[in-house]
Image (tube, grey):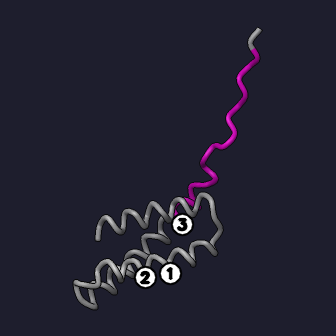
Amino acid sequence: MTILLAICLLIGMALGQRCNVFALVVATGVALVVAIGTVLAGGAWSSALAAVAAATALQIGYLFETALQPLIVDDLPALPAAG
């Protein structure tokens, strides 16, 4: 389950960098289905816990990356021309 949460956190960060919030809604639905499918053998409560934790990790990653977006420097100053 820890690997699932780490992957969801990284996917959330990638979505926060490139996509809008509507992509997060779709990704959360996919994460819920995948989490329930991967932990289904453990029982109903563990599957529900994994699904909620995966969706939460996805959203935390998106929020974290969105909060860090203004701090990321995209344009570096140009180097002076040689010669």
Mark 2 and mark 1 residues within 8 Å of each other at the beta carbon: yes
Judge the density around disc 2: few (<14), some (14-19), many (≥20) Cα neighbours within 10 Å.
few
Judge the density around disc 3: few (<14), some (14-19), many (≥20) Cα neighbours within 10 Å.
some
Q: Which residue is mark 2?
A: 33
User: How many discs appear?
Assistant: 3
Lateral position of residue 55 relative to residue 47, left or right: right
In this picture, which residue range is highlighted in magenta? 62-81
Where residue 39 appears, as percent x and y from the top left, is 29, 80
Residue type, numbered disc 2:
Val
SS at mark 2 in the image: helix
Residue 76 picture quarter? top right
Q: Residue at x 35, y 81 (%)?
A: 37
Where residue 48 appears, as percent x and y from the top left, is 34, 87
Front one among 71 and 37: 37
Q: Which residue is mark 1?
A: 29
Label 3 to label 1, Cα distance in Å?
17 Å
Mark 3 and mark 2 residues within 8 Å of each other at the beta carbon: no
Front one among 60 and 14: 14
| Magenta highlight on residue 42 | no
Look at the picture and state if 65 lies above or below 71: below
Q: Which residue is mark 3?
A: 63
Furthest residue to the bottom? Answer: 44
Front one among 80 and 54: 54
Can you say which quadrant of the picture contains the C terminus?
A: top right
Q: Earlier in the sequence, mark 3 or mark 2?
A: 2
Q: Residue at x 74, y 12 (%)?
A: 82
Where residue 68 appears, as percent x and y from the top left, is 56, 55
Q: Residue at x 22, y 84 (%)?
A: 42
Where residue 2 appears, as percent x and y from the top left, is 29, 67
